[in-house]
Image: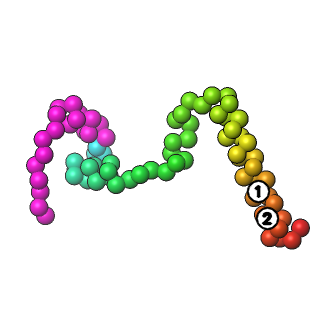
Amino acid sequence: MTTKTITVTEEAYNVLSRHKRKEESFSELAIRLTSSHGKLKDCWGLWKLSEKDMDVFDAIKRAWTESDDEMRRKLVGR
């Protein structure tokens, strides 16, 4: 396997070290951090939403639930 040497600041090294798992190499860390995009559900609760924003999300959730219920009734024939 070919390797490359890179230079990072001490601050960058310290940040990377904090994210590095015990048995993980820095190469594996770099691949893990740059290849995963995460899931939207992992972000849930990270934003501070206003009451108005929460009302909008609640309305969307109700609409999805009603739509799902209606679709089930149509599919089942009830």
Of the image marks 2 and 1, the number of the one nearer the N terminus: 1
In this rendered view, identify the residue nearer to me: 20 or 10.
Answer: 10
Give the structural element (helix, strand or loop) at label 2.
helix
Q: Is residue 43 magenta?
A: no
Query: Is residue 50 visible in this depiction of the protein?
Result: yes
Against 64, is 76 above or below? below
Q: Tell me which residue sits at (11%, 57%) in the image.
A: 3
Q: Position of residue 19 (x, y in %)?
A: 31, 40
Which labelled disc corresponds to residue 72?
A: 2
Q: Position of residue 70 (x, y in %)?
A: 81, 60
> Which image quadrant: the C terminus?
bottom right
Which labelled disc corresponds to residue 67?
A: 1
Horizontal arrangement in the rendering, residue 70 relative to residue 53 (left or right)? right
The local crowd at label 1, few if under 14, some if 14 to 19, many if 20 or more residues have their Cα within 10 Å, is few
Q: Position of residue 34 (x, y in %)?
A: 32, 51
Query: Is residue 24 visible in this depiction of the protein?
Result: no
- Residue type indicated by callout 1: Ser
Q: Tell me which residue sits at (68%, 30%) in the image.
A: 52
Look at the image and give the residue range highlighted in magenta: 1-19
In this rendered view, identify the residue nearer to me: 44 or 61.
Answer: 61
Q: Tell me which residue sits at (55%, 41%) in the image.
A: 44
Gap in Å between the C-alphas at discs 2 and 1? 9 Å
Which color scheme does this rendered protein use? rainbow
> Which image quadrant: the N terminus?
bottom left
